[in-house]
Image (tube, rainbow, N blue to C red):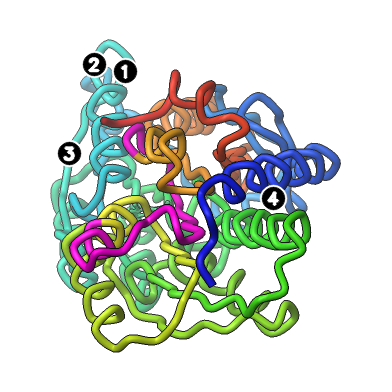
């Protein structure tokens, strides 16, 4: 089933309004609403600072401090890599914020998307004697021994961007997106679209997954995997594009060569979406004939929403530097900080893209 562009645009508008209403109702609203997620967590605005709630520190009693007396807190940032526009903006937000003028020094390690290298990166930061570690984990497994080593060295460790399912007494706090909620936002948009358009044809979905084992991929994939059977949607292809444009294009090319029918693309970041759109065009297919769902919200992806190429983007805020810095300062000052703080994120579609592009990150 192809979906004509006009119908898509009109119906997307209807779906977007329904989704916005539902998000506002449950308090998970757009970028200016603060909302409380699961117990002990507090949503923050994209630009606002994290607001501490009375929360357990989960038996973790290390707090950031200037142990070498140079008047600065040295932050060791163990970054995933440089795989996407989101990552570039995320790294830049740390390099911009963690400077002497804000009371910080930054030591940076790039894991190049290699989970094993990243564990060595953290061990190197411990050896360097940094005063707090911020870890954005490539994948979420095998971290307990390294986190314990940081704790034994007396270095407080913050998890950012992608969560870890480890004991609360191994890290100070988590700040970043709620990935499963992002996926639920995308799924809800598709459910509303189908309802608004009385779509009766089969929904056949191409699922471009992020880096397998990252909580970004696990959460976004879970939302689709949970919703598909209930909605009788068929996931006809599913493979990782490793959050990169090149791999996303390569994987979509292979799907197109296999020839199964599909009418929806659920792509777990904008860079893979760009690759998928290039593959469709190269195969002589009109991207506007498909419902394309993406994640992140890079400026160029928001422009593609305006141009009718992408139908909805589930937002994921990369500008975490200032808010992580705020949590470090609060903790260093003796404030109790929440164990988990989620960015408040919404969605971008034809109903709000013209407004959202004014503040969209990246290029
Ligand atoms: C999400 C982040 C993901 C982005 C991708 O918080 O970890 O990694 O969605 C990035 O663009 O590669």
The residue that label 1 is drawn on is: 103
**Disc 4 versus disc 3: distance between alpha carbons?**
29 Å
Among numbered discs 2 and 4, the one appearing first in the sequence: 4
Residue at x-position 50% and y-position 75%:
205
Q: Residue furthest right?
A: 25
The residue that label 3 is drawn on is: 107
Side of 153 relative to 218 (left or right): left
Please provide percent x and percent y for residue 247. Answer: 20, 68
Q: How many residues crowd around disc 4 within 10 Å: few (fewer than 14), some, or many (20 or more)?
A: few
Q: Residue furthest top?
A: 101
Residue at x-position 32% and y-position 75%:
240
Bounds of the magenta segment: 278-300
Give the number of the disc on residue 56: 4
Side of 97 relative to 10 (left or right): left
**Disc 1 versus disc 4: distance between alpha carbons?**
27 Å
Name the quadrant of the C terminus.
Answer: top left
Q: Secondary structure at mark 4?
A: loop
């Amino acid at each position: 089933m192809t979906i004509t562009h006009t119908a898509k645009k009109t119906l997307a508008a209807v779906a977007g309004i329904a989704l916005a209403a539902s998000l506002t109702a449950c308090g998970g609203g757009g970028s200016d609403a603060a909302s409380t997620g699961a117990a002990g967590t507090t949503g923050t605005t994209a630009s606002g600072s994290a607001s501490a709630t009375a929360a357990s520190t989960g038996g973790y009693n290390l707090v950031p401090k200037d142990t070498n007396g140079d008047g600065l807190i040295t932050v060791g940032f163990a970054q995933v890599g440089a795989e996407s526009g989101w990552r570039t903006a995320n790294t830049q937000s740390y390099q911009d914020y963690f400077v002497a003028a804000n009371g910080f020094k930054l030591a940076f390690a790039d894991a190049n998307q290699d989970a094993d290298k990243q564990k060595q990166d953290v061990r190197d930061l411990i050896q360097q004697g940094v005063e707090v570690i911020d870890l954005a984990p490539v994948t979420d497994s095998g971290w307990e021994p390294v986190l314990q080593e940081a704790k034994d060295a007396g270095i407080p460790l913050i998890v950012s961007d992608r969560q870890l399912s480890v004991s609360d007494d191994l890290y100070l706090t988590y700040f970043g997106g709620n990935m499963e909620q992002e996926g639920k936002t995308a799924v809800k948009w598709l459910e509303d679209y189908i309802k608004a358009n009385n779509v009766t044809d089969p929904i056949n979905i191409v699922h471009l997954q992020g880096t397998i084992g990252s909580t970004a991929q696990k959460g976004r994939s879970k939302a689709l995997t949970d919703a598909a059977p209930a909605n009788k949607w068929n996931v006809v292809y599913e493979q990782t594009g490793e959050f990169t444009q090149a791999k996303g294009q390569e994987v979509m090319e292979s799907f197109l060569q296999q020839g199964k029918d599909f009418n929806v693309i659920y792509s777990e970041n904008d860079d893979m979406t760009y690759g998928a759109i290039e593959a469709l065009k190269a195969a002589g297919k009109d991207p506007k004939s498909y419902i394309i769902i993406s994640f992140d919200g890079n400026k160029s992806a928001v422009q593609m929403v305006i141009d009718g190429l992408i139908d909805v983007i589930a937002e994921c805020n990369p500008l975490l530097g200032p808010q992580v810095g705020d949590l470090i300062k609060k903790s260093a000052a003796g404030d109790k900080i929440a164990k988990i703080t989620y960015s408040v994120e919404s969605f971008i579609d034809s109903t709000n893209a013209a407004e959202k592009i004014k503040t969209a990150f990246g290029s």
